[in-house]
Amino acid sequence: MSSTRISLIRHLAAGAPFLFASAARAADGPAVAGIPVDFILFAATLLGVAMFHHHVLKVALAGLAVITVYKIAFTGFKTGEGLAGFGLHMAHEWVLLVNLLCLLVGFALLARHFEDSGAPEVLPRLLPEGWRGPFMLLLIVWMLSGFLDNIAAALIGATVAASVFKRKVHIGYLAALVAASNAGGAGSVVGDTTTTMIWIAGVSPLEVLPAYIASAFALAVFGVPAALQQHKHQPIVRDFQAAHHVDWARLGVVGAILVGAIATNVTVNLKFPEAADHFPFLGVAVWVVLLVAIPLRKPEWSLVPDALKGSVFLLALVTCASMMPVEKLPAASWLSTLSLGFISAVFDNIPLTALALKQGGYDWGFLAYAVGFGGSMLWFGSSAGVAVSNIFPEAKSVGQWLRHGWYIPIGYVVGFFAMLLILGWQPHEKQKEGVAAAQVVQTTPATQN
């Protein structure tokens, strides 16, 4: 599972000129210096998010309104012209948007269930001394994300961090938690939406498994400085004398939600992949378990308004991105795949993966790592980042995220080249069912970068 949508910008500051060129060829609308106005408007929206981090929701909604009006009035959509085209476009996107909304809000309530269970209070006894404790927590999140949704893994990690560090969590460490959750699902076909898409398209799970080589190197590179950074900022607080009571019923609710999400994701993708295009199974499954469990333990409903605000922000960016006229990717190579990781920080990894499946010729392990991990470089680059920033609003700053999480892009590059040196670039021919499968799963539910 994992990854949900934050579709394209083409760059926040620089890079990826080949995508601009592809977009320019694909678009029929007005352009400035060869760049479609659509992308200029989207880039302005993302720049506004980066500059005015205290008003990100207003900026995102304003950007969405401007882009929507422009598309309706001038360029139309792939689904048609004017309001009718916009309506058909949203009819195609609604499953993804509802899934994302349900997951972000639902997992925020799940994280509070976990926090109130008392389990985080016990963890300081289990984590090792010194900087190794924060690193071990990153490793746990990395492993959890291999079979959980990356939102859930990141929120569990953030909840534990809030407890063991007495809410004094460094922004760099928050970025590392998000990176660990995104990297952890890169080599598992049930760990990220993108890898699930590749699996459904007919690629063997063994072909994405090598992505764990890259993500393990990346974890070592960004995990150590992040752990040292957090230990210096606030060491783990241990209270061996206090008696910590674990609410096993509440912990059982957490487990039931996660099991329900995993079972739904695997069942739908294996047995009914065509149905995933028409109903938000994953998000609904999470809420069904939450509601059924109310007689046992009630959720903290007061969290819903803030979670909704963060979710609407992400949905606005996702919707903007879905309207960008990207029709093709550059020729498959290790260099273009490396670039896709950076693009994935501001451009939805779901359509990127779908386009790659249609095109073929990729080494799927490299692609899974690039599009899965890339969103960690910015706080709004993945749904896991948005979810964590809802708990820690101070993380909603591109400048602070980049400044204190400088080791994440370094870890991405080191991991990529480590796998390249160990395994080499081994591209595969396009799968026969790739095109159809990519179309089926282009709105497959789960979570982003």
Image: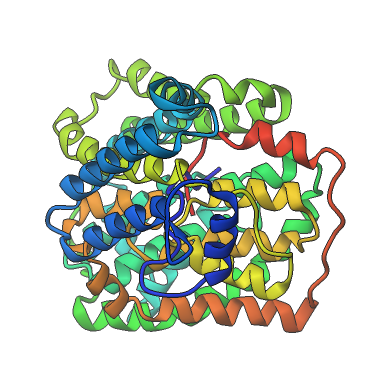
Q: Nearer the viewer, residue 420 or 270?
A: 420
Query: For the point 63% across and 76% down, which residue is it?
Result: 416
Indicate whether 175 appears above or below 54: below
Let me know if residue 89 appears in the view.
yes
* Residue 440, percent from left and from top: 67, 31
Query: For the point 36% across and 80% down, which residue is it?
Result: 406
State the image quarter where residue 232 is shown: bottom left
* Residue 445, percent from left and from top: 53, 34
* Residue 327, percent from left and from top: 61, 48
Q: Nearer the viewer, residue 371 or 163?
A: 371
Let me know if residue 191 appears in the view.
no
* Residue 160, percent from left and from top: 30, 56
Task: Answer with left or right where residue 152 lies relative to residue 238.
Answer: right
Task: Answer with left or right where residue 54 lies relative to residue 44.
Answer: left
Query: For the point 46% across and 76% down, which residue is it?
Result: 409
Tag count: 0
Task: Answer with left or right where residue 57 lies relative to residue 108.
Answer: left
Indicate whether 422 appears above or below 92: below
Location of the N terminus by quadrant is top right
State the image quarter where residue 407 is shown: bottom left
State the image quarter where residue 94 is shown: top left
Q: Nearer the viewer, residue 54 or 188?
A: 54
Q: How is the image coloured?
A: rainbow
Task: Answer with left or right where residue 311 lies relative to residue 180.
Answer: left
